[in-house]
Image (tube, helix red, strand yellow):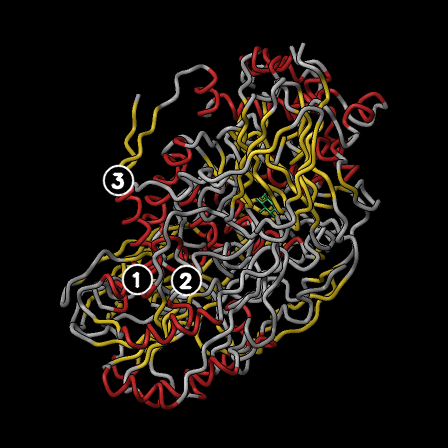
Amino acid sequence: MKKILDWKKYAEAARRVVAEGCVLVENKDNVLPLKKGTKVAVFGRIQHNYYKSGTGSGGMVNVSDIYGITDGLKNSARVKVDEELENVYLEWEKENPFEVGIGWGQEPWCQKEMPVSKELASDCASRDDAAVIIIGRTAGEDKDNLETEGSWYLTATEKEMIKNVSEAFEKTCIVFNTGNIVDMNFVKEFNVKSVLYAWQGGMVGGLGVSDILTGIESPSGKLTDTIACSIKDYPSSANFGSLKDNVYAEDIYVGYRYFESAAKDKVLYPFGFGLSYTDFEINAGDFEFDNSGNLPRVKFDVKVKNTGKVSGKEVVQIYVKQPQGKLGKPALVLADFKKTSLLKKGKTAKLNFEFDISRIRSFDDTGVTGNIDSFVCEEGTYEIFAGNSVRNISKIGEFTLDELIVIEKVSDALKPVVSFDRMKAVLDKNTNTISFENEKVDAAAPYQNRHRNENLSELDNFTERTDLDQDVLSVIKTLSDEELSCIVRGEGMGSPKVTAGTAAAFGGVSKSMNDKGIPCCCCTDGPSGIRMDSGAQAFSLPNGTCQACTFNPELVKDLYEFTGWEMVYNKIDILLGPGINLRRHPLNGRNFEYFSEDPYVTGVFATANILGLHSAGVTGSLKHFCCNNQEAGRWVSNSVVSARALREIYLPGFEMAVKNGADVIMTSYGSVNSMWTSGNYDLVTMILRKDWGFTGIVMTDWWAMTNDEGKEPVRFNIAQNVRAQNDLYMVVPDAAENSHNDNTLTALSAGELTRTELLRSAYNTVLFLKKSHAQARLENRDIEVIIKNRKKTAMDGATDKIEYFETYDGLSIPLDHVDTSRGKSYSFGIVTKDKHFYRMELVGKTGDNDLAQVNVSVSYNGVNVAVLCWNGTHGAYEAKGLTMDRPLSRNTVLNLYFAQSGLTLKEFKITKVKDNE
Ligand code: BGC
């Protein structure tokens, strides 16, 4: 069977997502759209250095081209870009090149900006009609955004540019090419008229942004975060960044749940807000409350009329005001949203809504309502509002519950083991205002081992169970202990058993397992497209922020179907994404990958990603489960968080995606309530599998640490991962070698891990593999994907110019002159007349970051044979290498591709290990 993947249509789908994801937050005097024939002066160096994504694993997609915002404007026939000004920038950039930084987690979050004098600004204003100022920021893995100029704040040069340009031009629009929101106080300071958040839109991002700037499309994106007056106003600020115990004292009052309850005056731009080029009127239609079914439900419609002058789309958001009850509640909670289709001026759309009260459930983690560990809706009146931001709403109906309703009782899981104070909302009945008081959260006695031991008997006669897949059971029964220890180890990075340069291989990683019909599965990052550190190129996608701001999950799902087929083309089965951690604080470095401060929005877009990939028979791994809400100390920090905040805020995004079919999950690096998530029985078994019914696979994050209850965490504690039902430890160099001396088999013989627990994880994995493309590949029946309309990649011809070195016993080739910056490659040749077996090693050093992933992909005569990975070497040279399992050819060309900057190379060593008899 064949499938055509049309690259042109793929790019168009991404462009639409970018356009709909743009959020216009200011537009005084109708600065935008730029009218037909506008002469536009583009300021800001980002005009030539568009950020397609953030940094780290979520940004490492190699692309053939990047279309930035200036490219988009220049491609548009509607406007004319001032080339004289562009040339000024090009000249300046020669002396001030883009700074790539020194590798993993150490890229600068902002670039030096060209100073714009009053003279330059007014010179341009004398010949141009409007100005666009592009300001960029990146951020990413292993380092948070900073509360400094150049990250959260504008730099002095940027401010001066904004001031001078806004004063000289009547029409100035500031465009943010960022992953995340930034401080917005400059708007008042400089009387800025127009601001567009354009986010990081992937490789065709600039085309989508230009569709908005030039008015081809009217903006319809909405903020998925609250932009507060000051970074200090976010309620998690007091604890954000703590490296050891990070206390979630704000509890469920994250984002608008906090601001709308008791700090309305601290908001500059509310959650859900975004302007359009047209106007809409939102009116209530019929409203019905139906109490006859299992759970009471509401059914209503909302009419949206385009009362403005151009076509556009509007997002109708439904918020609920709940009775404060005994638990205390946020003033408003988002219960649903829908986007209209494109409405012509004067036209009206009717949007139908229907949901039951489980959408507005609260979690009782103390028993104050008499229903401990239960989702409940307390008695009282529920008011429903509709509007186009959390601030611009009107009441469309209400209903009353005469008594509390228990929605669901769940397990008594993952409670804090230390006591702390959390915020609780209290309503002043006289003034009808909410304020916060402290409520003590009690410490639970240790429970993780107890829960595992209490449930162990469920595994009796596991392989004889009739409710399980019989084919899978019959395969796993034949696995030896040795094979079982291999199936819980993922191999990587860059395992030669799967697509070159990818993050991991797992499943049938040995011939004996392949012979039993278990295929080897391939997974790679994610989320911003396919990461192949071999240098192979792929499509890079708009980031998570941009996707969610569309409030259009259907559009995002369609885009991910293309990505799915691209994965099939590249023989990749799991994309390591979407990243769906809650945006607890704006300074989290990886916010660009995530969707929102709201769990419902998060769940909707996680589902859209997964279902899109499922359309092509591949899937994504929801990550990072859970509470990866900051990058600082992400592998050591312990989130101290109440069961209520977990169940209402940090888990529902995962829960919704799981209940909608997500089948792979990656745990996070850190700890939640003193148990590292990779081996957290309550999280992975009690909540994920028992409460939510998940039957897929769980994997650790790369080289994650795991602790036994009450103990310090260590790497390669695979026994505890498996006990918790985390099926795959990611990653080891070779699963069969056990080069890290992990404890899988020793724990098994010591009786600390049962064979059945290993079998249970093997079952999860093999069941998943059974329906995968990997299985079809093993059986030579996979779909062939043909890509059309894609231009040739820049990797073509990378090995054209090479120097040859002759060897017999071995030799050392100095490589200290080699440029190892990200994206570069270096090729050289080896001539060996006698074709012996050799070991090859690269000697290099990196910095201090233990979790850095500085990867060099080694190709041997065009075939990738290894991806060598340096973590932090703290400045000491380390040799990484491989022993070839075949004699070296007489003439061998080796290509080194540097997937990430940050490595200083010393030499390449080749040593004979065996004669070729
Ligand atoms: C990141 C994950 C990523 C993995 C593999 C880790 O550093 O946290 O999100 O999928 O590396 O690259």
Q: How far is the residue under mark 1 from the one under mark 2? A: 10 Å
Q: Which one is in front, 604 or 325?
A: 604
The C terminus sits in image quarter: top right
- 336 sits to left or right of 645: left
Q: Which one is in front, 302 or 549?
A: 549
- x 40%, y 34%: residue: 614
- 457 sits to left or right of 492: right
Toward the right, the furthest residue is 750
Q: Residues within 10 Å of mark 3 (few under 14, many from 20)?
A: few
- Where in the figure is residue 123, as x and y percent of width and height? 30, 87
- Tell me if residue 290 comes above or below residue 764 in the rendering: below
Disc 1 marks a residue whose amino acid type is: Asp
Secondary element type, mark 2: loop
- Identify residue for label 3: 789
Q: Contact (CB < 8 A) between labels 1 and 2? A: yes
Q: How far is the residue under mark 1 from the one under mark 3? A: 20 Å
- Tell me if residue 545 comes above or below residue 527 in the rendering: below
Secondary element type, mark 3: loop
Disc 3 marks a residue whose amino acid type is: Asn
Q: Contact (CB < 8 A) between labels 3 and 2? A: no
- Where in the figure is residue 442, as x and y percent of width and height? 77, 58
Q: Which one is in front, 590 or 36?
A: 36
- Where in the figure is residue 137, as x and y percent of width and height? 49, 67
- Identify residue for label 1: 71
- Identify residue for label 2: 50
- x 83%, y 23%: residue: 751
Q: Name the quadrant where ligand 1 sits.
A: top right
Q: Contact (CB < 8 A) between labels 1 and 3? A: no
Mark with earlier residue (3, 2): 2
